[in-house]
């Protein structure tokens, strides 16, 4: 555990912080943007780390079901990895008691990652059992993303905060073929954890295992930051934890969706984008409607949204937050893998039983500490299009006049009919501080 200074010895640089007015519109930059966030210096953030775990309301002891041969007793999706919890067992898991045993993946085998499905080498399992105050974790399955290296982290982070990247065999092979994986099983700051015998055929669903069940894979960790594989972390983890957990007296934080607040709207958007088959989405939403799900409205305040932007999860590992992510995973295992659809149902059922909530911060604040890259298929498609364009429009040839000693002259391409002649007045260079400049926070 880190020896911290007394946080009262530091001045509070964020005491008078307020959002500045939004920047002027910029047609060259459409879509959501980052907004300013006030972080305290890293040393001060570390000093603000709580010395003891937060209180877990209602639930004090959480254990998990183990079954050597899980039996499917009802005609729902589910999986052997998840243990096929019945509807009765599902409903009982929302009845919070001081001691509880619930389904939470890894139902076979002695410990998570050891012959449970989602199998991990013994050396990695030993490493994952070590105590850490803070870890950062991510995953890439199906070679779906390109690893992004964190930056702007301090000396203590380098020494004390491990970064773990879970990959399947397909992704590991790609890392080896591109010579990115070194002899210590690292790619830059990330330690690569190879997963064999993945439980699902869908790579994105496999990614939900470490995303939602980090507390099972890392039983001796206090705090975790999960980021999707396409994201690059650009703020020190201690500063993120201080800003979104410790300063807010929160134990779980996730950003709200930048545009949608309502689960019904999110479901329709998923169907329109072909994120999952429509029949399964409709079945899940109809099930929740029968349980009492309603459209989001101001009547739910102070809850600000029913739809998260789930690519970042900031969590203290205590029984109530571990239960939350267990039950959230069970919904993903039972219904569709679109975790935005099940988030509010699980959250609201727990909040109805105990005094606990989720810090749903602004999506523009999330974009302040992570940069979002494209998935690998889009990056390769863009690279392919660049090559195609370069072959379709080769550079103009040089023409040398044999009677002249002057250097070769580039022959300009012919203008097609209707193309306008270049006008130097239409291409003025924009000076510093002029109307055309912009600021990125």
Image: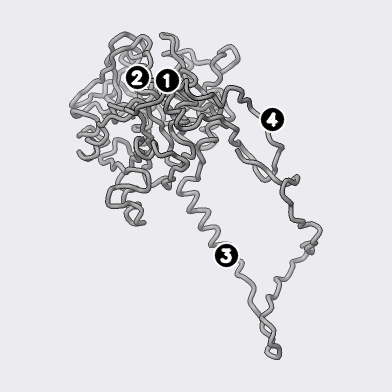
Tell me if I can see residue 371 in this picture.
Answer: yes
Q: Percent from the top left, x then y, of residue 193?
A: 30, 41
At a point 25% along the width and 36% down the height, the residue shown is 127
| Residue found at x 70% / y 46% | 437
3D distance between C-alphas at marks 3 and 1: 52 Å
Q: Which mark is residue 251?
A: 1
Q: What residue does disc 3 label?
A: 390
Q: Position of residue 361 (x, y in %)?
A: 53, 25
Q: Of tags 3 and 1, which is closer to the observer? A: 1
Q: Secondary structure at mark 3?
A: helix
**Nearer the viewer's eye, disc 3 or disc 2?**
2
Circles 3 and 2, Cβ within 8 Å, touching? The answer is: no
- Disc 2 marks which residue? 318
Q: How many neighbours does mark 3 have within 10 angstroms: few (below 14), some (14-19), or many (20 or more)?
A: few
- Could you say which quadrant of the image residue 403 lies in? bottom right
Q: Earlier in the sequence, mark 1 or mark 2?
A: 1
Viewer-nearest residue: 338 or 320: 320
Indicate the quadrant where residue 126 lies: top left
- Seen in the image, is 373 located left or right of residue 222? right
Q: Where does the image place residue 55, in percent across and percent down from the top left?
A: 37, 13
Q: Is residue 174 above or below residue 202?
A: below
- Image position of 193 with respect to 315: above or below: below
- Please report whichever mark, 3 or 1, sits nearer to the chain's N-terminal start: 1
Q: In this picture, is 223 found above or below 23?
A: above
User: Badge 4 is on which residue?
Assistant: 21
Cα distance in 3D space between marks 2 and 4: 38 Å
């Amino acid at each position: 555990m880190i020896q911290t200074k007394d946080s009262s010895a530091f001045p509070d640089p964020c005491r008078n912080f307020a959002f500045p007015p939004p920047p002027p519109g910029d047609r060259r930059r459409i879509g959501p943007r980052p907004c300013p966030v006030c972080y305290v210096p890293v040393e001060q953030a570390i000093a603000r780390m709580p010395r003891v775990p937060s209180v877990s309301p209602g639930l004090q002891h959480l254990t998990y079901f183990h079954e050597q041969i899980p039996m499917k007793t009802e005609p729902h999706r589910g999986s052997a990895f998840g243990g096929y919890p019945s509807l009765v067992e599902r409903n009982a898991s929302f009845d919070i008691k001081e001691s509880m045993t619930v389904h939470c993946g890894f139902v076979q085998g002695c410990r998570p990652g050891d012959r449970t499905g989602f199998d991990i080498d013994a050396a990695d399992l030993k490493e994952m059992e070590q105590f850490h105050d803070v870890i950062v974790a991510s995953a890439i399955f199906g070679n779906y993303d390109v690893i992004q290296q964190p930056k702007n982290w301090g000396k203590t982070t380098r020494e004390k905060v491990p970064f773990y990247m879970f990959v399947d065999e397909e992704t590991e092979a790609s890392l080896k073929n591109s010579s990115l994986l070194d002899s210590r099983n690292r790619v830059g700051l990330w330690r690569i954890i190879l997963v064999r015998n993945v439980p699902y055929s869908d790579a994105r669903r496999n990614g939900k295992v470490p995303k939602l069940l980090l507390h099972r894979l890392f039983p001796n960790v206090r705090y975790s930051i999960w980021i999707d594989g396409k994201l690059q972390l650009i703020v020190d983890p201690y500063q993120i934890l201080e800003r979104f957990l410790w300063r807010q007296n929160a134990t779980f934080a996730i950003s709200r969706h930048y545009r949608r607040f309502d689960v019904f709207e999110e479901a329709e958007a998923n169907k329109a984008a072909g994120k999952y088959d429509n029949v399964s989405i409709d079945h899940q939403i109809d099930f929740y409607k029968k349980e009492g799900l309603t459209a989001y409205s101001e009547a739910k305040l102070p809850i600000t949204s029913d739809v998260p932007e789930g690519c970042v999860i900031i969590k203290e590992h205590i029984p109530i937050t571990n239960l939350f992510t267990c039950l959230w995973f069970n919904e993903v295992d039972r219904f569709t893998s679109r975790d935005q659809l099940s988030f509010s149902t699980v959250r609201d059922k727990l909040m109805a039983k105990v005094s606990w909530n989720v810090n749903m911060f602004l999506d523009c604040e999330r974009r302040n500490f992570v940069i979002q890259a494209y998935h690998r298929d889009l990056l390769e498609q863009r690279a392919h299009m660049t090559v195609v364009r370069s072959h379709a429009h080769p550079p103009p040839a040089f023409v040398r006049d044999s009677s002249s000693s002057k250097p070769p002259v580039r022959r300009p391409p012919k203008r097609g009919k209707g193309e306008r002649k270049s006008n130097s007045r239409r291409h003025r260079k924009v000076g510093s501080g002029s109307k055309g400049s912009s600021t990125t926070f």
